[in-house]
Image (tube, coloured by chain):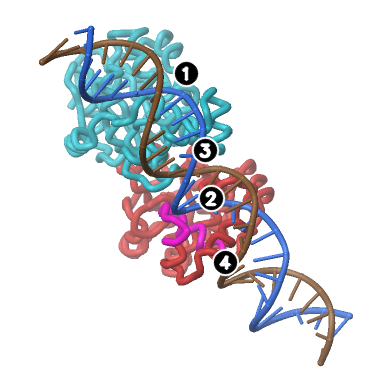
Chain colours: A red, B cyan, C brown, D blue
Amino acid sequence: MSGGSTPIRLLLADDQALVRGALAALLSLEDDLTVVAEVGRGDEVVPEARRSAPDVALLDVEMPGLDGIAATAALRAALPTCRVLVVTTFGRPGYLRRAMEAGASGFVVKDTPARQLADAVRRVHAGLRVVDPTLAAETLAAGVSPLTERETEVLRTARGGGSAADLARALHLSEGTVRNHLSAAIGKTGARNRADAIRVAEQNGWLLGE
Amino acid sequence: MSGGSTPIRLLLADDQALVRGALAALLSLEDDLTVVAEVGRGDEVVPEARRSAPDVALLDVEMPGLDGIAATAALRAALPTCRVLVVTTFGRPGYLRRAMEAGASGFVVKDTPARQLADAVRRVHAGLRVVDPTLAAETLAAGVSPLTERETEVLRTARGGGSAADLARALHLSEGTVRNHLSAAIGKTGARNRADAIRVAEQNGWLLGE
DNA sequence: CGGCCGCCCTGACAAATGTCACGGTCGGGG
DNA sequence: CCCCGACCGTGACATTTGTCAGGGCGGCCG
């Protein structure tokens, strides 16, 4: 491993400064990689990428301002030549799907051995796709969200923890309608509670969209 | 900054292999620090520490097997000369309190700049205490858990998401009693739902103990 | 066109959840 | 000693939640 002439230029985005710095240290050990920018918010990714022109961007999913999926789409639109490698804490099945749809070239969970990260970066830079095989299988198994649009919206609003009446007011619906959508969501997720349904839907990444 | 003769020996515990490896890379850049062991589970901390005899242990709070707080207590009991620096993702107010009570010498959130980590390690090794001042203030504000022992236990069991009847069976209580404890917990946490109460209690670290 | 299917909306009903008032036990002061 | 407060346990009651059957649209295919 190593060494052509010009090293691969990297942008790091992670909201945890310590992790960000540590990843920078890890990747800087490789002599064919160089970290040219670091940001801590999703909405800083595109501006910073415009300045530093990286070859590959490592984006966390959980970030303030703009989540990693949305940041991926924005970056792909602004700088089509820059590849994106999404690095996330949770192996939520739906995250992978959303990331790929948004134009990411790779998807790595933070459980993977540290040594493999540099290789993943190189593969992505070479135009290959990098995907955790286990996670890919889970994604296929979980499938696309079975929730209808309204159900998703109601469930998303219900995360705040209000009563059915509150949700009805917020969404301009009858209280019974809200309960009905929730009931449908509970059935489809296989949950027993409203709270359970929210957990399941979140775990599968079915609540991401705007 | 550097160097006496023998470097400080470090043990790293974090369930995310990538973060663990990155931290190792970051700390290895300092010539007065050396990483002698890495583990990914809380219950591996003490056995590994026995083998490698570190001077300082960096422990994450969120870990499988045994959480970082419990691991701190176990490590302090087994190897009293080894200092503990807790490094965690979430600045939950109660975590800090619990960590200190368990015998930790320092508490750092992953939001802190990467450069400060090595200094924190050195201070802890020197016998000083390292605490994020902002977090310390929050801890005092949040205070100790207002929940009674039974209430905590019921709330903890309720995390699984079962009905009141299920909880009653699991805890050998009447269904009404369970509901009453939950109601008290809801009142004390200022929540409106059972689910809300669980969230609040978890956020403040009131549900940690065994 | 007519039937069919999926989605959205709604009200009525049963089951769960949350609240309340009450009794019992234990330990610390006055 | 007796009172008081804190905690635990329990059942009755109102409120909330989840389920069901059903009606109104709009698109798709025979």
Circle nearer the viewer, 4 or 3: 4
In front: B92, or A136?
Answer: B92
Depicted A195 relative to depicted A177: above or below = above
In three-dimensional space, the C-alpha distance between marks 2 and 3, rounded to whole angstroms, equals: 40 Å
Name the residue tied to disc 3. A116
Circle nearer the viewer, 1 or 2: 2
Percent position (x, y) of residue B177?
A: 47, 30
Q: Residue at x 36, y 45 (%)?
A: B191
In three-dimensional space, the C-alpha distance between marks 4 and 2, rounded to whole angstroms, equals: 17 Å
Question: Which amino acid type is marked by label 1?
Answer: Asp
Question: Which amino acid type is marked by label 3?
Answer: Gln
Q: Chain of mark 1?
A: B
Label 2 Cα crowd, 10 Å radius (few <14 / some 14-19 / many 20+):
some
In three-dimensional space, the C-alpha distance between marks 3 and 1, rounded to whole angstroms, equals: 26 Å
Name the residue tied to disc 2. A194
Q: Residue at x 64, y 58 (%)?
A: A146
Name the dominant secondary structure of the magenta segment. helix
Percent position (x, y) of residue C21?
A: 36, 37
B149 sits left or right of A193 in the view:
left
Q: Chain of mark 2?
A: A
Name the residue tied to disc 4. A149
In three-dimensional space, the C-alpha distance between marks 4 and 3, rounded to whole angstroms, equals: 38 Å
The part of the chain drawn in magenta is A150-166
Name the residue tied to disc 1. B43
In front: B169, or B11?
Answer: B169
Are circles 1 and 2 on residues that touch, CB within 8 Å? Answer: no
Q: Earlier in the sequence, mark 4 or mark 3?
A: 3
Are circles 4 and 1 on residues that touch, CB within 8 Å? Answer: no
